Image: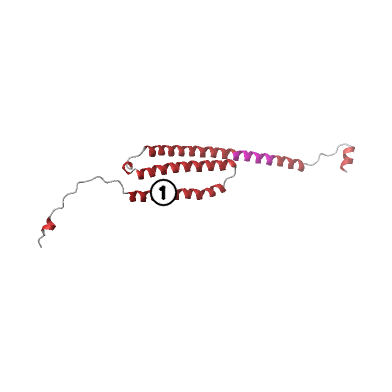
Amino acid sequence: MPKSRAQTARKPEQPETEPSAPSPVEMLSAWNLEIGRFYLRRYQQYWKLPMRMQSLITQNDFKEVQSEFLADLAEDYRGEAARLSQIVDADNAAEPTVTTEVTAEATAEAKEREYAASLLKAQEDAAAIIDQAKAQAEKILASAHKRAQEVQPPKPATNAKEIRKTA
């Protein structure tokens, strides 16, 4: 079957255009999706906080957990602001922005501080355990000395006054 003229006619070639910026609907959709993900991550951290607080012993432990939580909170919001900025500024999304570079540096510094703080906390905990062990050992020794004195037989009476006192 021969092809008709309409079938054989070539379509005019469209000039290649660069991809355009996302439509407002696409941008709003991406924005809302990112906000939803962010809130989910933050709420998970909020939900974990009471579980962490149950294991706290001292007021310093509470202050440490609180400061870690607030530092994470600030870092998360800083990172989220950068991601939302990239969604709005679709032209620069492919290139890392100064904000994301600063955020990456801040994240690395925060992780380094967190590691140093955890090492310091471990050292403090070890020192506290050693102090507790020393105190317990001193109590055990004192109790042993007291018991040894109680168990020792009395010295035999040597004169008449001492014999009358024991009788």
- The correct choice, above or below, for 14 with respect to 109 in the image is below
Side of 79 relative to 142 (left or right): left
Residue at 45%, 41% (x, y): give it: 75
Residue at 43%, 48% (x, y): give it: 38
- The correct choice, above or below, for 159 with respect to 6 in the image is above
Residue 58 in picture, x, y percent from top left = 60, 42
Viewer-side residue, 92 vs 114: 92
Residue 87 in picture, x, y percent from top left = 36, 45
Residue at 48%, 48% (x, y): give it: 45
Side of 38 relative to 65 (left or right): left
Q: Which residues are magenta?
A: 128-141
Q: Is residue 62 magenta?
A: no
Side of 135 relative to 70 (left or right): right
SS of the residue at dot 1? helix
Q: Residue furthest front?
A: 24
> Does the magenta stretch mainly form a helix, a strand or a loop?
helix
**Residue underneath mark 1:** 35
**Quadrant into which the N terminus falls:** bottom left
Residue 86 in picture, x, y percent from top left = 36, 43
Viewer-side residue, 46 vs 11: 11
Tell me if mark 1 has few (under 14), some (14-19) or many (20+) residues whose alpha carbon lies within 10 angstroms of its own: some
The kind of residue on which mark 1 rests is: Ile
**Quadrant into which the C terminus falls:** top right
Side of 151 relative to 164 (left or right): left
